[in-house]
């Protein structure tokens, strides 16, 4: 997984830095204005581990997650 930052120019997202490979599948999350966020070292580690788990295919379906959430509520 690669994280990239870009801006919308002429209705298209222009990535800053190294270009992504042609045909890359991307997810775009738009920030409000110049909104940023900060995470602690521990939170960053947890996020990176979650990304690594997803890359390894260690994921659950939406249906399974929804059922787990319902049971815990």
Image (spheres, rainbow, N blue to C red):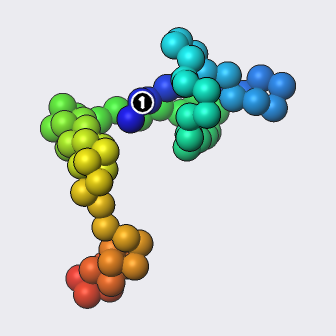
Q: Residue sitting at 37 percent across and 70 percent down? A: 61
Residue 41 vs residue 47, the one in the foreground: 47
Q: Position of residue 42 (x, y in %)?
A: 16, 38
Q: For the N terminus, which image quadrant? A: top left
Is 17 drawn above or below residue 43 in the view shown?
above
> Viewed as shown, does residue 14 lie left or right of 65?
right
Quarter of the image where one finds residue 21? top right
Tell me, yes or no, if residue 4 can be seen here: yes
Q: Position of residue 73 (x, y in %)?
A: 28, 84
Is 69 drawn above or below residue 43 in the view shown?
below
Q: Residue sitting at 33 percent across and 78 percent down? A: 64
Residue 43 vs residue 53, the one in the foreground: 53
Q: Which residue is mark 1?
A: 2
Q: Crowding at label 1, few (<14), some or many (≥20) Cα neighbours within 10 Å?
A: few
Q: Position of residue 58 (x, y in %)?
A: 25, 57
Quarter of the image where one finds residue 59? bottom left
């Amino acid at each position: 997984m690669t994280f990239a930052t870009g801006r919308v120019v002429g209705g298209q997202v222009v990535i800053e830095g190294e270009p992504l490979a042609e045909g890359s599948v991307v997810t775009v999350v738009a920030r409000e204005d110049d909104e940023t966020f900060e995470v602690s070292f521990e939170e960053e580690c947890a996020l990176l581990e979650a990304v690594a788990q997803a890359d390894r295919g260690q994921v659950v379906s939406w249906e399974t997650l929804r059922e787990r959430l319902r049971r815990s509520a």
